[in-house]
């Protein structure tokens, strides 16, 4: 059987928390920030926990987690 490969893009963007949930950066905070409200920029700080549906999809991209 061939070996399972990890998707490189997913490997760079997602990590696992101690409880086994997937953590990701919040989107839309790289450029054009002058257009975005202060509230949106504040909420986009740090990271977020992915929903169960998104995490299930990503488990196939990250088989060794």
Image (spheres, helix red, strand yellow):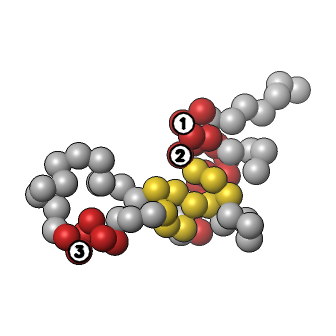
Q: Which residue is mark 2?
A: 13
Q: Of label 2 and label 3, which has the lower sequence position?
A: 2
User: Alpha carbon of mark 3 to alpha carbon of mark 1: how far?
Assistant: 29 Å
Q: Nearer the viewer, mark 3 or mark 1?
A: 3
Q: Which residue is mark 3?
A: 39
**Mark 3 and mark 2 in contact (Cβ < 8 Å)?**
no
User: Alpha carbon of mark 2 to alpha carbon of mark 3: how far?
Assistant: 24 Å
Q: Is residue 23 left or right of residue 39?
A: right
User: Alpha carbon of mark 1 to alpha carbon of mark 2: how far?
Assistant: 6 Å
- For label 1, the crowd category at 10 Å Cα-Cα, with few meaning under 14, some 14 to 19 and many 20 or more, is few
Q: Is residue 65 left or right of residue 34?
A: right
Q: Is residue 59 left or right of residue 52?
A: right
In this orientation, which residue lies closer to the viewer: 12 or 52? Answer: 12
**Mark 2 and mark 1 in contact (Cβ < 8 Å)?**
yes
Which residue is found at the position 74% from the left and 44% from the top?
Answer: 63
Q: Is residue 24 left or right of residue 43?
A: right
Which residue is found at the position 16% from the left and 68% from the top?
Answer: 37
Which percent across, then down, holds residue 39?
23, 74
Which percent across, then down, holds residue 5?
72, 31
64 shown above or below 8: below
């Amino acid at each position: 059987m061939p070996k399972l490969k990890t998707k490189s893009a997913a490997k760079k963007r997602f990590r696992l928390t101690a409880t086994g949930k997937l953590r990701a950066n919040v989107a839309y905070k790289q450029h054009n920030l002058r257009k975005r409200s202060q509230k949106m920029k504040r909420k986009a700080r740090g990271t977020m926990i992915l929903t169960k549906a998104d995490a299930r999809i990503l488990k196939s991209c990250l088989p060794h987690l």
